[in-house]
Amino acid sequence: MDFELVWFDSFGAKSSCVLVETKDVSILIDPGVATMHRSFPASLPKKLFWLEKGWHEVEKAARRADVVVVTHYHYDHHSPDRIHIYEGKLLLTKDPNKYINDSQRGRALRFFENLWRWFGDQEIKSGNHQKREEFDRADVLDVVKLSEMDEEHVKWFQARVKKWKSYRKIEEADFDNLKIRFADNLELSFGRTKLKTIGPIFHCVECSRVGWVFMVVVEEGSKKLLYSSDLCGPIIEKYAEVMIREKPNYLVVDGPNTYMLGYLLSSENLRRAINNACRMIQKIDFELFIWDHHLPREPRFRENTAEMWKLAKKLGKDVMTAREFKENKPAVVEELMS
């Protein structure tokens, strides 16, 4: 198994894109790039330069891929406009019909409408409403049992279910140059290579209004890579336990969004993320742990997560950002030094 860290936040534009290559198949995960936020300490021309450079790298990697995976519909994880990158692929996506918030449903609808026009030369065909389906838990790992939810969260989840049942169903598709499959909690084999998704699971925190995502596990022989997109640490302890049980050789994990500390990230949830990362470092016998997406968006990210980096150094384990893996400082640090 080989892998390439195609583009990540530490390179200067929001992304979490990795290419995994085995003897059987090449898998590109989350081919999206977005411009850094306004407070990121770099000029707008520099941010736009990184954005275009990121897309150059993503499109180059896409040409080598047989399979493309989209874990959710934020623009730093997919593109509804650069449709050509999906040509000739098996496209595995987050189910756009359920376990999804309104914002991502809208983005997903635009994405699939563009795919149908480009590859099918037709308008998207919608299926029936999903009124008969029962939703008896809020995520696949039952992190929050419905019977234990407080009244506010029960109302929130019931409202979401009502929305899902009202949606016209977006269908999977088989075109000459593209096959689309919805990949929540899916297992596939490509020769000796196994691909597994774990989800739908909450985006960052329990009952997140931001939506749901899934983890990706790729295994070939004795080697295993585990990828998480937007779990923010992970913050949720059960998600960290899943990662520990998987015993991956390589982890590509998104860190806590410390640039939003005190706003969308509380001190309590930052502490949970650090504790979970420390447990993973202690309990997993990995070769490499990439901790990047969300994290290197502000210059004090190492200071704000110092306990984790100190533990990794003490145990002699390779934990780093994607850009450090390529022997450079993260862009947010390099900008302050220039």
Image (cartoon, rainbow, N blue to C red):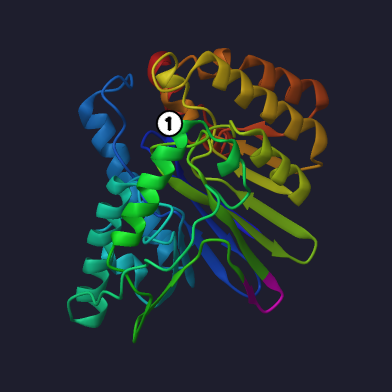
In-image side of 328 versus 284 (left or right) = left
Quadrant the N terminus occupies: bottom right
Q: Is residue 311 above or below residue 238?
A: above
Q: Nearer the viewer, residue 277 or 150?
A: 150
Q: Nearer the viewer, residue 93 or 14?
A: 93
In-image side of 26 versus 281 (left or right) = left
Answer whether residue 78 is visible to the viewer in this image: no
In-image side of 152 versus 145 (left or right) = left
Q: Magenta part of the protein: which range? A: 188-193
State yes or no: residue 280 in magenta. Answer: no
Q: Residues within 10 Å of mark 1 (few under 14, many from 20)?
A: few
Q: Nearer the viewer, residue 152 or 66?
A: 152
In-image side of 188 versus 41 (left or right) = right
Secondary structure that dominates the magenta span: strand
Q: Please report the residue visible at 18 percent of the width from the left and 80 percent of the height from the top.
A: 122
Q: Which residue is mark 1?
A: 152
Q: Residue furthest bottom?
A: 176
Q: Please report the residue visible at 31 percent of the width from the left and 53 percent of the height from the top.
A: 163
Q: Please report the residue visible at 70 percent of the width from the left and 44 percent of the height from the top.
A: 243
- Give percent across and percent down for residue 300: 49, 14
Q: Secondary structure at mark 1?
A: helix
- Give percent across and percent down for residue 311: 75, 21
